[in-house]
């Protein structure tokens, strides 16, 4: 039908045609209800409320209101901002004053006001006969009704948008009426503004208008304007037709131009002039587009305008200091000499569509979007006023005149009805939410014809038939046809439905409150929520096929028939919304199926977790427009001050009070006293109306672990030992070697901390706890099941799974052998397919509305490599656990046992580590990332079912870290899953998008509807709740040590400087890394890290320290990513100074021995003969206690891994924390950062990264804010 109509009018070259309007040849009496002025007279009374609930600060653009008590407004440019945001933005250039009306009387609720406004607004408007002639150029609009389409919250006002659409709502938009309520312009009083425009000039085929389309009529009504003075205005092209179309614009005084204010230098001018300009359009202008003006560094402080015969704009304009809120920061003001006349403002009106140059204008307000300009100038920029030959400028008056245009409210026969209030007692599978009756017969007929033309007939098997006389509408997922029908549905019924809802007449509440959720239960005989195969089709099983025999690479494949059946099952799933039209009754019904929402919410919560019972499911109806963005508050970690102290008999040294309280909290969690509410939601939007049916599934369950995040050096290890000792008798009674149940606590930690942990055990418990150290597979093979089950503590390195000896991988080989698996486990991949998007403050705007990542690299084969690794490991574990072993059997893998509890020391190391691709050239980095990836697998971070995890426990999983890195919801999600498998809202979608994502996963991701702002709020609320309940950070006694931070500066060599310049490509000074591509940043960092000057500076600082303290010990940290670690080794070797370092080839026993040299003070001559310098990579920074023997730390280079500034700062703080911690014996600790500058003394990359990594807010986020 749509295509036939289009063909019919193609010969008219796209003009607006009266016969395509829905009011064509309709009588005036049939159309008219009342004059629009009657409505305006009532609604203008809400202008003050409209302004108060509008957007008055940049932090309110996502739908919320600022929590600040005060709102300020600049008296110069009218820019408004709340008190809180004044601290975040540079507002020094603005003259801010309190908005008294806001601060004294409060703001109100935007959602309530929107409903109030929508409930009062008429659904349809129309222009009376003769309007086309009065509007000059536009024609044909008299035949169209204007339907209310959008209610929008704007800056200082609310807007109602009415649109006129061809062909009964399915064609082109041909006109618009906009009504603004609130502030009538910046620095103006409150009132009402209305505008009319026709889109004919821009939609015609011949010579269409390009750029912002001007309004053809306007109306301004103040709060005290009587009805008989309400008069429309249209453009007057005759008024002020002066003899001279020129004025003189003379500037005096000089002030910095906007280019100077933002830091543009001469290099930018040179670069612009040398750039190729083939794509620049040819425009006749006195100001060259491809060159800066000779006076580009200056704007006039004062502008004098003369020569306007009408004397409207003549006078002196002073430049205001306002920056960044006005185009080009260019704003001049002429003060009014009379109180009844407004000030005039001279500024640049931007062409935001970039179809022409920006235009200088004079207006009665300082903001171009107010559209109150009275004069515009041709071909003028501020620099023209400083050169005499360009003082003379062409101008044009923008005048308006009164008009008798009549805009009326449209009569409507359509009424909306609905059933009685829906409650938990009468809710059912599918019910009529509301019905629109009294549709125009021609409209209903056209709609049915369009549905038939779309190819979706009433008998189509994919369409749910509700009644014999009803024709179902396809509102989504049907390409062009679905889009056109949705558009028609919105035009016909959207405004009626929304107004009905705004008046509170729907049987379901739209309020965002706990009472709005309606419990829903499963009908007898039907599947439990989340398990219905009709609602949640079962995915086909994947198979693995080798596609590269040489490199033993596999890819996932699926059975074609199963995939087709699965796809059809997805298409045929019951829909949450069903809309149908009845031609005989001229009505339209909206049906809702709450069971669909319930099943989808429950499925996300329970699938893959072996959890079905104890689910509470509820539904509610919401509006997308009323949802506010989640508050971006920091994750605040709680202390344990409210808990009592627990003493543990048998500890050789007593706990500090804060440690005893932390222990009490951990014991409460292990006893099941701390309950966490797991929650998941599903959302189903009715297209065109934006009603959202929401399902919520919740489950209350005890926490199965948590995190002790006390500051570095605060005694987390001793608290954990006390926890083990307090429970030791029960643990020993629970041993059952025949079933593999061990009474031991499994400690998983970085390999260099094994001896340190065992020393702490001996220090606090002596021999009360039996400890086994399984450093390698060889150690494991010496131990029987009985040995392991009868231990109290078992310590293993976190990289156990990826243990290697040359090309051999002993642990995985032993796992495959013992489990009798047929498939070898490949090495862990050294790459990640996604890059995490960390956020610290501001509104979370993800790359897509669903995922917590910036995006993936698009390399499906790499994702398959990661998934195949998991598949092989999981297969081996299933085989292992299906077997029965004698208690005397030796070498049984660690994953076979059920442990009393698992302790993950430095647990932050394995969370969200997708920091970018790892280059194959860096051997050490590959080794590090392979172990990190293997650690994630070994710890079971991606396994949502605790029973299927590699490491199973009877009680809990605990994490220890001084830098928990809890600045994103994604990290909290992974932390919660690691610590016992707790579900945080959004986790199901998180795991479907992590590094093992399949092509089918991506297909399903795109099938999902986008996540609303309320859903994102639910994610953050759940994550915040988990952090409050499961993570604790207790204040330690202040460390009585002075930290002397030293920045050691040197300049790079000429050779390195030349290499750097070849990458910089003309950038004189590196002020930010954002101006470089990723590969350019990598090159810059490699040049800086490998610089010989950096190595020489390192040795200079070491020699200075050793000269004054010959017996001291120095810790040097360097990064392996960019060659800094290799450079440090090279420099130390060339100096011939004896030093120690831990490399890829260093075994676990040797690592612990080397670390022990720097943990303890020298006692014997042999101790004193050992190296004085220890070189560690930043990856090896966590966990070591080096405070007793060391008080000098050198950071060879600043840490930079990409966009994750919090993680980088955390790594540096971990490095410094090896020495700056409780127990430091020296009164002063020296932290030296090596800083490399360019040859001319200007800043290189070090300056930017050091400043970033030492920023106060970044450091707070790295250690997590805590109470």
Image (tube, grey):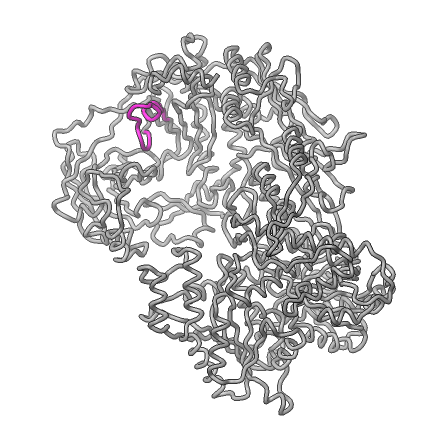
Q: Quadrant of residue 592?
A: top right
In x, y percent, where is residue 74? Answer: 36, 46
The quarter of the rendered structure image containing the C terminus is: bottom right
Q: Is residue 424 left or right of residue 1178?
A: right
The one of 95 and 145 positioned closer to us in this rendering: 145
In x, y percent, where is residue 180? Answer: 41, 30
Q: Quadrant of residue 697?
A: top right
The one of 185 and 1184 positioned closer to us in this rendering: 1184
Q: Is residue 581 left or right of residue 525?
A: left
In x, y percent, where is residue 339? Answer: 27, 37
The one of 435 and 1070 positioned closer to us in this rendering: 1070
Asked whether 212 falls inside the magenta stretch, the response is yes
Please determine whether, in this image, residue 831 is positioned above or below residue 788.
Answer: above
Q: Is residue 541 left or right of residue 169?
A: right
Please determine whether, in this image, residue 415 is positioned above or below residue 356.
Answer: above
Q: Residue furthest front?
A: 550
Per the rendered image, the range of residues in magenta is: 195-213
The answer to whether any part of residue 344 appears in the image is no
Q: How many marks?
A: 0
Q: Residue at x 63, y 22 (%)?
A: 463
The answer to whether any part of residue 712 appears in the image is yes
Q: Quadrant of residue 967?
A: bottom right
Q: Is residue 225 left or right of residue 557?
A: left
In x, y percent, where is residue 832? Answer: 56, 55
Please determine whether, in this image, residue 307 is positioned above or below residue 1141.
Answer: above
Asked whether 1184 falls inside the magenta stretch, the response is no
């Amino acid at each position: 039908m749509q295509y036939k109509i289009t063909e019919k009018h193609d010969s008219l070259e796209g003009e607006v045609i009266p016969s395509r309007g829905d009011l064509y040849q309709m009588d005036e009496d049939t159309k008219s209800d009342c004059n629009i002025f009657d409505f305006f007279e009532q609604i203008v009374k809400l202008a003050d409320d409209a302004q108060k609930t509008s957007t008055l600060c940049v932090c309110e653009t996502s739908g919320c209101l600022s929590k600040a008590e005060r709102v300020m407004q600049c008296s110069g440019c009218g820019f408004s901002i709340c008190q809180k945001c004044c601290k975040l933005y540079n507002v020094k250039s603005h003259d801010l004053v309190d908005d008294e009306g806001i601060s004294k009387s409060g703001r109100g609720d935007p959602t309530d006001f929107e409903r109030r406004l929508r409930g009062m607004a008429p659904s349809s408007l129309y222009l009376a006969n003769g309007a086309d002639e009065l509007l000059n150029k536009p024609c044909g609009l008299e035949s169209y009704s204007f339907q209310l389409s959008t209610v929008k919250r704007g800056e200082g006002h609310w807007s109602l948008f009415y649109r006129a659409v061809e062909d009964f709502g399915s064609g082109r938009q041909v006109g618009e009426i906009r009504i603004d309520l609130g502030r009538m312009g910046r620095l103006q009083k409150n009132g009402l503004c209305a505008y009319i425009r026709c889109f004919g000039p821009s939609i015609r085929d011949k010579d269409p208008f390009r750029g912002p389309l001007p309004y053809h009529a306007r109306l301004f009504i103040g709060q005290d304007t009587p009805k008989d003075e309400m008069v429309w205005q249209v453009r007057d092209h005759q008024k002020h037709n002066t003899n001279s179309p020129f004025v003189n614009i003379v500037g005096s005084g000089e002030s910095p131009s906007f280019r100077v204010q933002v830091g543009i230098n001469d290099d930018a001018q040179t670069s612009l002039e040398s750039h190729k300009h083939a794509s620049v359009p040819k425009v006749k202008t006195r100001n060259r587009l491809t060159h800066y003006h000779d006076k580009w560094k200056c704007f006039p402080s004062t502008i004098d305008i003369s020569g306007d015969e009408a004397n409207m704009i003549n006078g002196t304009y002073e430049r205001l200091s306002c920056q960044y809120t006005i185009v080009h920061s260019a704003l001049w003001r002429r003060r009014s000499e009379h109180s009844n006349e407004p000030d005039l403002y001279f500024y640049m009106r931007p062409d935001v569509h970039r179809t022409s140059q920006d235009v200088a204008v004079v207006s009665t307000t300082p903001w171009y979007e107010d559209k109150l300009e009275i004069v515009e100038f041709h071909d003028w920029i501020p620099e023209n006023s400083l050169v005499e030959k360009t003082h003379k400028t062409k101008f044009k008056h923008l005048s308006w005149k009164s008009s008798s245009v009549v805009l009326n409210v449209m009569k409507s026969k359509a009424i909306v009805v609905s059933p009685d209030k829906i409650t938990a007692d009468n809710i059912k599978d599918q019910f009529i939410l509301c019905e629109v009756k009294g549709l125009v017969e021609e409209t209903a007929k056209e709609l049915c014809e369009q549905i038939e033309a779309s190819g979706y007939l009433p008998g189509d098997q994919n369409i749910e038939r509700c009644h014999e006389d009803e024709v179902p509408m396809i509102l989504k997922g049907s390409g062009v046809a679905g889009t056109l029908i949705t558009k028609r549905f919105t035009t016909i019924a959207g405004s009626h439905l929304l107004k009905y809802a705004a008046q509170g007449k729907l049987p379901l509440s739209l309020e965002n409150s706990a009472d709005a959720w309606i419990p829903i239960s499963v009908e007898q005989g039907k599947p439990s929520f989340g398990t219905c195969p009709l609602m949640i089709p079962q995915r086909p099983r994947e198979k693995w096929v080798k596609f590269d025999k040489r490199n033993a690479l596999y890819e996932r494949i699926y059975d074609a028939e199963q995939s087709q059946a699965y796809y059809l099952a997805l298409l045929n799933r019951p829909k949450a919304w069903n809309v149908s039209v009845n031609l005989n009754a001229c009505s339209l019904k909206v049906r809702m199926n709450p069971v669909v929402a319930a099943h989808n919410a429950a499925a996300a919560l329970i699938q893959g977790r072996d959890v079905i019972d104890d689910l509470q499911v509820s539904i509610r109806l919401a509006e997308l427009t009323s949802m506010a963005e989640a508050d971006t508050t920091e994750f605040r970690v709680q202390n344990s001050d409210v808990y009592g102290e627990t003493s543990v008999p048998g500890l050789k040294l007593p706990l500090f009070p804060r440690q005893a309280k932390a222990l009490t909290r951990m014991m409460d969690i292990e006893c099941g006293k701390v309950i966490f509410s797991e929650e998941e939601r599903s959302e189903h939007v009715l297209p065109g109306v934006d009603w959202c049916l929401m399902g919520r599934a919740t489950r209350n369950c005890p926490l199965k672990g948590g995190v002790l995040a006390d500051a570095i050096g605060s005694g987390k290890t001793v608290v954990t030992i006390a926890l083990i000792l307090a429970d030791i008798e029960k643990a020993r009674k629970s041993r059952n070697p025949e079933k593999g149940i061990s009474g031991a606590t499994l400690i998983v930690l970085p390999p260099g901390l094994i001896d340190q942990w065992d020393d702490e055990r001996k220090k606090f418990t002596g021999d009360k706890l039996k400890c086994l150290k399984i450093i390698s597979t060889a150690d494991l093979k010496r131990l029987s099941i009985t040995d392991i089950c009868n231990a109290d503590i078992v310590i293993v390195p976190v990289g156990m799974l990826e243990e290697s000896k040359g090309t051999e991988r002993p642990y995985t080989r032993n796992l495959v052998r013992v489990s009798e698996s047929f498939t070898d486990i490949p090495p862990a991949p050294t790459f990640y397919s996604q890059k995490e998007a960390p956020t610290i403050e501001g509104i979370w705007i993800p790359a897509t509305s669903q995922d917590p990542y910036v995006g993936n690299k698009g390399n499906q084969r790499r994702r398959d490599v990661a998934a195949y690794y998991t598949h092989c490991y999981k297969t081996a574990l299933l085989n292992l656990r299906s077997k029965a072993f004698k208690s005397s059997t030796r070498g049984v893998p660690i994953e076979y046992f059920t442990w009393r509890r698992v302790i993950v020391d430095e647990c932050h190391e394995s969370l969200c580590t997708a920091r970018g691709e790892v280059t194959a050239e860096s051997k050490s980095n590959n080794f590090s990332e392979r172990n990190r990836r293997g650690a994630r697998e070994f710890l079971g971070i991606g396994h949502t079912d605790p029973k299927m995890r590699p490491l199973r426990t009877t009680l809990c999983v605990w994490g220890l870290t001084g830098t928990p890195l809890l600045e994103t919801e994604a990290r909290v999600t992974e932390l919660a899953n690691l610590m016992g498998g707790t579900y945080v809202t959004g986790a199901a979608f998180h795991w479907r998008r992590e590094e093992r994502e399949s092509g089918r996963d991506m297909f399903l991701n795109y099938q999902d509807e986008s996540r609303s702002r309320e859903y994102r709020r639910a994610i953050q609320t759940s994550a915040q709740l988990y952090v409050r309940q499961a993570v604790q950070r207790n204040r330690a006694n202040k460390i009585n040590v002075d930290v002397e931070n030293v920045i050691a500066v040197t300049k790079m060599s000429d050779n390195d400087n030349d290499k750097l310049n070849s990458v910089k490509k003309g950038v004189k000074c590196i002020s930010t890394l954002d101006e470089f591509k990723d590969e350019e940043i990598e090159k810059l960092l490699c040049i800086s890290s490998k610089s010989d000057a950096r190595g020489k500076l390192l040795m200079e600082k070491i020699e200075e320290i050793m000269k004054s303290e010959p017996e001291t010990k120095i810790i040097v940290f360097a990064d392996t990513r960019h060659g800094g670690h290799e450079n440090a080794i090279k420099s130390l070797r060339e100096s011939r100074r004896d030093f120690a370092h831990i490399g890829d080839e260093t075994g676990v026993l040797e690592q612990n021995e080397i670390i022990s040299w720097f943990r303890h003070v020298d006692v014997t001559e042999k101790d004193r003969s050992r190296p004085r310098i220890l070189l560690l990579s930043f990856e090896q920074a966590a966990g070591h206690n080096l405070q007793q023997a060391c008080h000098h730390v050198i950071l060879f280079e600043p840490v930079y891994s990409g966009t994750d500034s919090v993680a980088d700062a955390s790594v540096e703080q971990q490095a410094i924390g090896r020495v700056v911690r409780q127990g430091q014996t020296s009164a002063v600790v020296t932290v030296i950062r090596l800083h490399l500058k360019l040859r001319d003394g200007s800043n290189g990359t070090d300056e930017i990264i050091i400043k970033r990594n030492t920023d106060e807010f970044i450091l707070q986020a790295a250690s997590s804010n805590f109470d």
